């Protein structure tokens, strides 16, 4: 007998027929004698609709009311799944985040889970009842509903699995595992049987939305065995594991991309101490995250061009903050560019292999794709390129690193 947390994403619960399919899948595990708790997302497209309604109602919204609205999608699916299970003879009950409760911090819109009161869930295991927890939501210190950021049901599931010390956390989605790159763009992408926590963390944080970054962080810290698999086909998925469980380490095991990037270039900034602090200080004060940075000394050696990236949603605000500091910074021009994407190659094998970055640069050069900014970490190389080349770049790199499926 095992204790399992099963999480079903939006496409898996997209309509009543699919919810019934999920119920049958859950019943199978219950019938095998396992202790099962379930976490559900909202029906596919519902959260987008809710977010759109908030934006339509009010441009600068109150984040607490935003959470009240967008958390509602998961309430529907948790109740429907409980009904579908009861209908096939499985004892089940739904729980909203505030009911258990799932305690979070007070950062509405992207709250972090602090603790989960698991007493009720554990009691249900003993009674062979399936507890269904609405994902993506919790209860803030202000006594109000919080949400965990887009894709947050993955994090709800892993946090619950950690809290009840589950043997497994199965994340059911619309693909049958983690691939070497997004299978929707790279048709030759290969399914991985296993991936290390560290690589999965980089893949997720560099844009592969198959798992929310925070869920991988939690899984890594609490050693939760996560499996990503399809709710539509009956086959093993991808296990996220420790590095020592992988015998043959690929140099590059995955390629991720993020469209959520925007570039800002400050032209002819005076090249003197303190300038970077003067630019990035006000951005940090405005809670704008800066990701990649590159600085070029210009011909006259007295000024420099500085380029950096921010999230697309922060572009207008970032330009405004920079313009406000214009008199102090003394630059000639600020050039925003939203039409960029970040492509990252990731692999733990990079630690012991040279030439990974060079292969990336030469591959992109051979396709005439200009690299605008570069950043690296121990197991990752990222480049910023024009958005129009995204698909070409992904496919070319996938082939160049020998990742294509046979
Ligand atoms: P869910 O609604 O089940 O949470 P998501 O849409 O959040 O599903 O995540 C699944 C999607 O992630 C897939 O449909 C796929 O397009 C995308 N994806 C991006 N990168 C990868 C990858 N490396 N492997 C698998 N899927 C990926
Ligand atoms: N429904 C939420 C979203 O669409 C949470 C999730 O699906 O994980 O972002
Ligand atoms: Mg998701």
Image (tube, grey):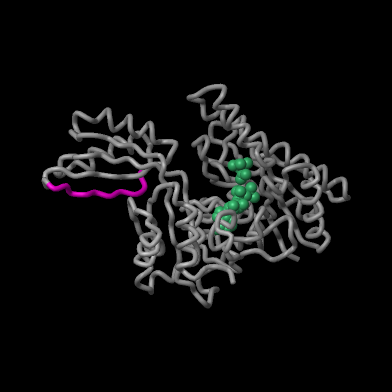
Instruction: Look at 58% across and 41% down and name the residue there.
Output: 103
User: Quadrant of residue 347 in the image?
Assistant: bottom left
**Residue 258 or residue 118, whichever sits in front:** 258
Secondary structure predominantly adopted by residues drawn in magenta: strand
**Residue 142 or residue 356, whichever sits in front:** 356
Residue 136 shows in this picture: no
Instruction: Look at 83% across and 60% down and name the residue there.
Output: 31
Task: Report the side of 354 relative to 124 (left or right).
Answer: left
Please, is residue 359 above or below residue 290 in the view? below
User: Quadrant of residue 177 in the image?
Assistant: bottom right
Q: Total number of numbered labels?
A: 0
- Residue 162 covered by magenta stretch: no
Could you tell me which quadrant the N terminus lies in?
A: bottom right
Instruction: Look at 58% across and 45% down and name the residue there.
Output: 152
Please, is residue 382 above or below residue 283 in the view? below
Where is residue 367 shown, x and y percent of the image? 40, 59
Residue 186 shows in this picture: yes
**Residue 275 or residue 331, whichever sits in front:** 331
Task: Report the side of 202 relative to 74 (left or right).
Answer: left
Where is residue 254 shown, x and y percent of the image? 50, 63
Where is residue 379 shown, x and y percent of the image? 41, 64
Residue situated furthest top in the rendering: 57
Tell me which segment is drawn in magenta: 290-299
Please, is residue 200 above or below residue 17 in the view? below
Task: Report the side of 142 relative to 72 (left or right).
Answer: left
Instruction: Look at 29% across and 35% down and name the residue there.
Output: 282
Where is residue 256 shown, x and y percent of the image? 48, 56
Residue situated furthest bottom in the rendering: 247
Could you tell me which quadrant the C terminus lies in?
A: bottom right
């Amino acid at each position: 007998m095992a204790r399992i947390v099963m999480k079903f994403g939006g496409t898996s619960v997209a309509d009543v027929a699919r919810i019934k399919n999920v119920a049958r899948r859950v019943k199978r595990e219950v019938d095998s004698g396992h202790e099962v708790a379930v976490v559900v997302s909202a029906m596919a497209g519902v959260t987008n609709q809710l977010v759109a309604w908030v934006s339509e109602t009010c441009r600068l919204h109150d984040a607490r009311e935003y959470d009240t609205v967008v958390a509602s999608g998961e309430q529907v699916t948790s109740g429907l799944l409980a009904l579908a299970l009861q209908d096939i003879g499985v004892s089940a009950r739904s729980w909203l985040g505030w009911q258990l409760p799932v305690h979070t911090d007070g950062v509405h819109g992207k709250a972090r889970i602090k603790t989960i009161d698991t007493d009720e869930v554990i009691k249900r295991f003993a009674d062979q009842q399936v507890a269904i927890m609405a994902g993506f939501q919790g209860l803030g210190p202000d006594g109000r509903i919080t949400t965990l950021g887009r894709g947050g049901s993955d994090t709800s599931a892993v946090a619950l699995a950690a809290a009840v010390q589950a043997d497994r956390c199965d994340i059911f989605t619309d693909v049958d595992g983690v691939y070497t790159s997004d299978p929707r763009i790279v048709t030759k992408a290969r399914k991985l049987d296993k991936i290390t926590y560290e690589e999965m963390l980089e893949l997720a944080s560099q844009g592969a939305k198959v798992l929310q970054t925070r869920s991988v962080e939690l899984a890594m810290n609490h050693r939760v065995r996560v499996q990503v698999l399809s709710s539509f086909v009956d086959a093993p998925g991808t296990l996220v594991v420790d590095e020592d469980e992988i015998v043959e380490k690929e140099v590059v095991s995955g390629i991720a991309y993020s469209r959520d990037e925007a570039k800002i270039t400050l032209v002819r900034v005076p090249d003197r101490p303190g300038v970077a602090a003067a630019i990035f200080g006000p951005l940090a004060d405005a809670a704008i995250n800066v990701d990649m940075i590159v600085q070029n000394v210009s011909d006259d050696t007295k000024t420099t061009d500085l380029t950096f990236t921010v999230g697309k949603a922060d572009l207008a605000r970032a330009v405004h903050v920079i313009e406000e500091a214009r008199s102090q910074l003394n630059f000639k021009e600020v050039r925003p560019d939203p039409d960029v994407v970040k492509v990252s190659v990731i692999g733990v094998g990079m630690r012991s292999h040279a030439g990974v970055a060079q292969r990336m640069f030469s591959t992109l050069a051979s396709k005439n794709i200009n690299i605008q900014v570069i950043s690296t970490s121990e197991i990752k190389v990222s480049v910023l390129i024009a958005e129009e080349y995204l698909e070409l770049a992904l496919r070319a790199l996938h082939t160049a690193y020998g990742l294509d499926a046979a």
